[in-house]
Image (cartoon, rainbow, N blue to C red):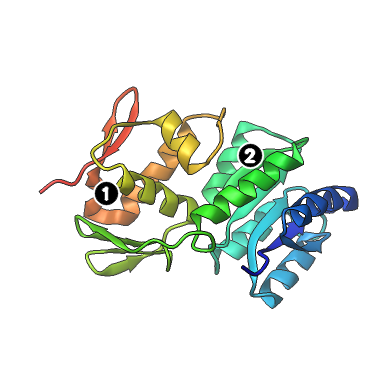
């Protein structure tokens, strides 16, 4: 398999080197940017970038604006780094389509594990056939979802959430279990994160959104009704 290319964006060269060294050790290819403007230039020029590790506080263009612009044209997975670690920042990041959120200081080994987890769930590391259930077709290889034959646009996390629901249809899932499987790590933030994603996913699924049932005080269940 060719090396997977990761774009690391941080204005601190020491931080970039730390992340780069651990990624290279795990056989990733790394390209670097020292500010948001350079990051966008590289991203638009290099079509092989499979994932972005993006710092929030940067000169020229900050991480939020970089993420917002990239999400206008691409669903490439984004891991956001921040020194703040505040709940509101996490919610803003997920609203913008951030796939993972890591507060500094962090363990480089954990960061690499999350990179691998995201890519493992993507078509780069797995290839499963399309699944059709109740008018919804989910194709993991092409990363496409159609509802009653009409294609809908989902963020990376919305896609993963729908896939997890479909794979576990008919099973009651707690918020904690959903977060641990879809986000792939023990999440200690506010439950509003999962509720926000479910709300958006329901809206995008239209009438099929009613398949996602709320289990009060626990979580959700995906259940196809006749």
Of callouts 1 and 2, which one flags the residue occurring earlier in the amino acid sequence?
2
**Quadrant of residue 89 in the image?**
top right
Q: Which mark is residue 89?
A: 2
* Whole-percent x, y for residue 124 in the image: 54, 63
Cα distance between the residues tagged 1 and 2: 28 Å
* Name of the residue lying farthest toward the top: 217
Residue at 69% of width from left, 44% of height from top?
111
Residue at 75% of width from left, 65% of height from top?
39
The residue lying toward the viewer, choosing from 184 and 205, is: 184
The residue lying toward the viewer, choosing from 62 and 75, is: 75
Residue at 82% of width from left, 52% of height from top?
21
Q: Secondary structure at mark 2?
A: helix
Relative vertical location of residue 45 with respect to residue 159 in this rendering, above or below: below
Circle 1 Cα neighbour tier, 10 Å, few/some/many (<14 / 14–19 / ≥20): some
Circle 2 Cα neighbour tier, 10 Å, few/some/many (<14 / 14–19 / ≥20): some
The image quadrant where one finds the N terminus is bottom right
């Amino acid at each position: 398999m060719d090396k997977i290319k990761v774009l690391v964006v941080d204005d601190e060269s020491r931080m970039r080197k730390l992340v780069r060294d651990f990624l290279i050790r795990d056989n990733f290819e790394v390209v670097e940017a020292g500010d948001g403007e350079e990051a966008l230039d590289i991203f638009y020029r290099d079509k092989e970038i499979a994932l972005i590790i993006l710092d929030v506080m940067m000169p020229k263009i900050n991480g939020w604006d970089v993420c917002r612009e990239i999400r206008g044209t691409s669903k490439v997975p984004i891991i956001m780094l921040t020194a703040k670690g505040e709940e509101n920042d996490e919610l803003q990041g997920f609203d913008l389509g951030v796939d993972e959120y890591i507060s500094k200081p962090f363990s480089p080994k954990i960061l690499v594990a999350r990179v691998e987890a995201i890519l493992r769930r993507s078509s780069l590391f797995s290839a499963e056939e399309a699944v059709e259930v109740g008018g919804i077709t989910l194709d993991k290889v092409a990363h496409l979802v159609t509802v009653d034959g009409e294609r809908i646009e989902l963020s990376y996390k919305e896609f993963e959430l729908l896939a997890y629901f479909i794979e576990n249809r008919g099973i009651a899932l707690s918020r904690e279990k959903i977060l641990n499987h879809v986000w792939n790590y023990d999440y200690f933030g506010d439950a509003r994160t999962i509720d926000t994603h479910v709300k958006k996913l329901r809206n995008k699924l239209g009438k099929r959104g009613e398949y996602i049932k709320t289990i009060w005080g626990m979580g959700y269940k995906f259940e196809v009704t006749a």
